[in-house]
Image (cartoon, grey):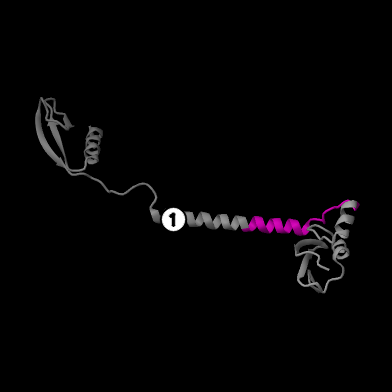
Amino acid sequence: MRTFFFAVLAAASMQLGAATVFRCDMPDGSVVFSDRECSSGQSQQLDVEAQSIGGSLAPSDEYQQLQRQRDAERDRRQIQQQYRNAREAINQAPCRTFSSTQLRRLVIKHQVVVGMDKSDALRAWGSPTRVNGSQHAYHWARGGSSYFYTENGCVRTVQGGFNG
């Protein structure tokens, strides 16, 4: 019986305004609640106000924006970690292997490429004007400058080209 009453109240609360509920005292002594007057027994009209707390179960705009910021920060950290891992792998990787023919062509053409052994790069461009740690700087007599950077004995970055 109570279940029926709460079901009627729930149905009534779904409506925007107040709902009318009838309490029916039946001849056998039972009580029935209905949205219509009773055909048999005694009816009493009850006014039930809508019981609504409002709002939405969806996350708020502020929460969604905060979640997007958290996701972006997490993605940024993951990308930074992947970059660090890739740099570490490069730093620990051996120099690239060139065939003797490839290496001879690079040296003759005065080309320094990433992955080349430092000694081979020096053979291709000659002695640098200055060495600043891992940077080998070349200031050409014809003008301009070129650089290559080494890590663990391998060329990791090249800026410019031979102009000697």
Residue 156 position, x and y percent, is 77, 61
**Where 2 sits versus 154, above or below?**
above
**Where 17 sits versus 117, above or below?**
above
Residue 26 position, x and y percent, is 13, 27
Rate crowding at label 1 as few (under 14), some (14 to 19) or many (20 or more) other CA atoms within 10 Å: few
What span is colored magenta in the figure?
80-100
> Which residue occupies the foreground of this view, 115 or 45?
115
Q: Label 1's element?
A: helix
Residue 40 position, x and y percent, is 10, 25
Q: Quadrant of the N terminus?
A: top left
Residue 139 is one of the magenta-drawn residues: no
Q: Identify the residue shown where x is 59% and y is 58%.
A: 77
Q: Quadrant of residue 86?
A: bottom right
Give the residue at mark 1: 65
> Which residue reaches farthest left?
42
Residue 85 is one of the magenta-drawn residues: yes
Q: Identify the residue shown where x is 61% and y is 56%.
A: 79
Q: Identify the residue shown where x is 16% and y is 29%.
A: 30
Q: Identify the residue shown where x is 86% and y is 65%.
A: 122
**Where 113 sits versus 136, above or below?**
above
> Which residue occupies the foreground of this view, 68 or 99?
99
**Where 73 sits versus 57, above or below?**
below
> Which residue occupies the foreground of this view, 142 or 107?
142
Q: Please, what is the dominant secondary structure of the magenta stretch?
A: helix
Q: Quadrant of the C terminus?
A: bottom right
Q: Quadrant of residue 46?
A: top left
Residue 137 position, x and y percent, is 79, 71
